[in-house]
Image (spheres, rainbow, N blue to C red):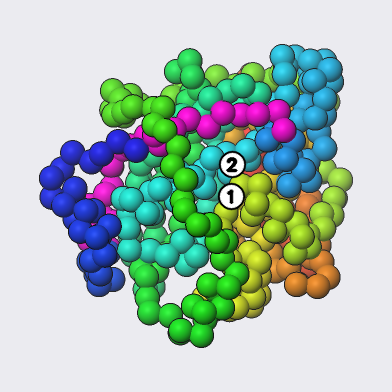
Amino acid sequence: MTQVDDPEIQARIAALKAGAKMTPEEVAEHTRAMIGLNYTVDDYYEVGREEIRKHARAVQDDHPVHWDEARAAALGHDTLIAAPTFFSMLGIVAQRRLFEDVVTGYDLWQIMQTDQRLVLHQPIRVGDRLICDVSLDSFRQSMGADMMVTKNIVWNQYGEPMMTTFTSLVARPSVEVDPDVMDKLDHVMMKIDHEPQGGQTVFGPFDRYHEPDPTLKPQPYGAIDFDSLEVGQELPQVTKVLTLGNLVNFAGVVSDPNPIHFSPEAAQSIELDGIVAHGMQTMGLGASYISAFVGDPAAIYEYNVRFTSPVYVPTVGYAEVDFTGKVRSLDRETRRGVIALVAKQGDRKIFGRAQAHVQFR
């Protein structure tokens, strides 16, 4: 990643990498100083045909544009396109580097996602080389926790914007953890002899850091006809099933090492009732539900979810998530609409505000 120019910040980061221990107050001060920092992940992410399929399978999305080139072509796509939440495939890399190299002092397994906003400029395709600009957009403290918003702008190899994302996180500074808990974590975390390092392929900083965010130009692609819709129209209910196997598979597909998604001990150590599904996994399930209704996921140009309650998944057995939706609004002039989404585990809502903005034909 590109280096921070401020010498004081550089010195602080170097000290932290050398093992310096900060108090929670110092962590907050350091994080606040990072607001507005921009850097670019120093290696591009190349989108492969099977990566698109693996992600689609992980979020239980069987829409043909992710699987079948001929059927994707029938909807106007020159190759397979990725599901709307494909960003989770590269987002975890950008987030890990952010918290390891810049916004330090937090344990990744103690960071929880609370909101996700995806602004989708164009569909991600096979062969795209994705370049990710990262910044810390805001920071505040509330009820003993640190709350921050990170922004990512993703570009392809031609300098075209692909998506802009805003991720709200709640975190607590690294704390001393019960040695017994740490021992259990040590026996469930992924082990590798040596962390491999890829070569640098992207060299920032870039002038675009100081430019306004890219503007949206939604396209309908293969979406259904606007005139077939009416405000208040309900989407049929769909139930998605999650098991521990689903969680482990998703963690592997997106390279998420956080043990709260597969270790009861890790989940309980941060006061969760048990292992929980990834926020982006449940958001991906919701996107597949909406995509099936609108006809083409590429027509979704914005997708926002507030995570209000985790989906608890038993170590043996399964969890059910019920999805329902409604056409909330329609704009005849632009032929755009908003679909409100509801997701429940039993009687408990797992999403607060959740909606997709769609460009219809």
- Disc 2 versus disc 1: distance between alpha carbons? 7 Å
Membership of 32 in magenta stretch: yes
Query: Observer-nearest residue: 159 or 204?
Result: 204
Q: Position of residue 60 (x, y in %)?
A: 79, 46
Placement of the N terminus among the 4 image quadrants: top left
Identify the magenta region: 28-50
Q: Name above or below for residue 322 compared with residue 132.
A: below
Front residue of 251/321: it is: 251
Q: Is residue 270 visible?
A: yes
Going from N to C along the chain, the mark reached first, 2 or 1, is: 2
Tell me, for residue 89, which label it has, or none: 2
Residue at 16%, 52% (x, y): give it: 11
Q: Is residue 20 left or right of residue 47?
A: left
Q: Left or right: 301 with respect to 99?
A: right
> What residue is disc 1 on?
255
Image-based side of 127 in relation to 59, left or right:
left
Vertical side of 75 occupied by 103: above or below:
below
Name the amino acid, label 1. Ser
Query: Within 10 Å of the Cα at label 1, are there few (<14), some (14-19), or many (20+) other Cα atoms?
Result: some
Is residue 293 shown above or below 341? Answer: above
Q: Are marks 2 and 1 in contact (CB under 8 Å)?
A: yes
